[in-house]
Image (tube, rainbow, N blue to C red):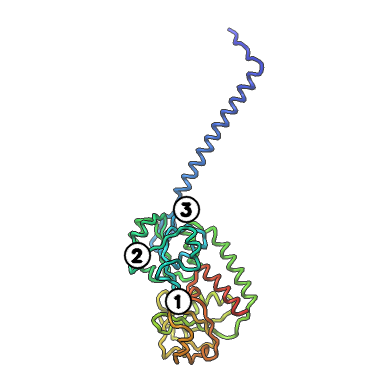
Amino acid sequence: MRVPSMPSGGRPRRLAALVALLLVALTALIGCGSDTEAASSEGATRVIQTEKGPVTVPAQAKRIVVLSGGLAGYLYALDAPVAATDTRVLGVTNFDGGFPPSWAAKAKAQGTTQLPTGEELNIEAVAAAAPDLIIGGGQGITAVQAEKVYDKLAAIAPTVLVSKTVAAWQEQLRQVADAAGRSDRVEAMMTAYRDKVAQVKSSIKVPAGNFAYLLSLPNNKPYLVPQTAALPALLGELGFTADDVLAKAGNPKLFGSGDSVEVSPELLSQVASAPQAFFIPVGGRTQDQLKQDPVYANLPSFKDNKLYELPATSYRPDYDGVMATLDLIAKRFA
């Protein structure tokens, strides 16, 4: 039996219909692929190495709880999402509440909540913030608090503690960025920093002679910042020569995180004998108050009025603190 021939134009119509069906199927497959890809990205993780061993963290965290106010500034500079944070920053802490001025606007814009402060870390408040990543450690009391309850924190969310031996802000920035999945932003920040250093260095006149770095703490004991610490290292890039106070003090054991050294009042005139000094008040006596103290008043930097004050945020600076300190130096030594 002979099959009837297809009417004229039938074959093109069938071909067009087939193409349309294939396009619909392809579109559906692309849609499914996007959904799968998004879901895969949403649940993606990475393994990073910490002092506590390998920790599996989100590929890019969405809700970060920061246990140290000294580290929070890095996350805001990285535009990372901070769900809750400790607000204590050395020398600028407002114990009545409120965010430190350097990142208050960013914290409010993100809707970040403040973690309660106290002698112990508030585990319940950390859990209530529903973090997918917890970052803590660094320097100060908050690092000690986090270390004590690390296992409880790790049960809430992946927890990364920056080592207290990491005092250089550059390394703190890199570790925090790595934990938060924002390492791709670090190089641009470092380029901006290097550019500013070059700009400031070319625009200032650095006084000849060595500088001591005097620290004024609440206990009113004499402290100096060793030449190996973050602030002298930063200003060293600009041409300021830090005095070797460690050698003058007999190479004593460094205090706390290694960025200060206590000397006796009797030895202060020997150790802080540099012709000029930077003065950093961190909750202690002011310049004017120290000028009334013979132990300080007889130092060369005090007697010759070659004392240059810097804010507490310059002492253990985060990225924004470094950039602000460079601006201050540019104005003061123009």
Foreground of the two, 265 or 286: 286
Farthest-out residue, right: 8
Between discs 3 and 1, the one toward the N terminus: 3
Q: CA distance from mark 3 to mark 1?
A: 33 Å
Q: In the rendered image, is residue 135 in sight?
A: no
- In the picture shown, does residue 68 fall above or below 35? below
Between circles 3 and 2, the one closer to the viewer is: 2
Q: Which residue is mark 1?
A: 259
Q: Residue at x 48, y 59 (%)?
A: 178
Image quarter hosting the C terminus: bottom right
- In the picture shown, does residue 199 fall above or below 7? below
Q: Amino acid at mark 3?
A: Ala
Q: Amino acid at mark 1?
A: Asp
| Quarter occupied by residue 199 | bottom right
Pinpoint residue 105: horizontal percent, then vertical percent.
50, 63
Q: Which residue is mark 3?
A: 59
Q: Badge 1 local density, few (<14 within 10 Å), some, or many (20+)?
A: many
Q: Which residue is mark 2?
A: 121
Foreground of the two, 313 or 18: 313
Q: Are marks 2 and 1 in contact (CB under 8 Å)?
A: no
Between discs 2 and 1, the one toward the N terminus: 2
Farthest-out residue, front: 96
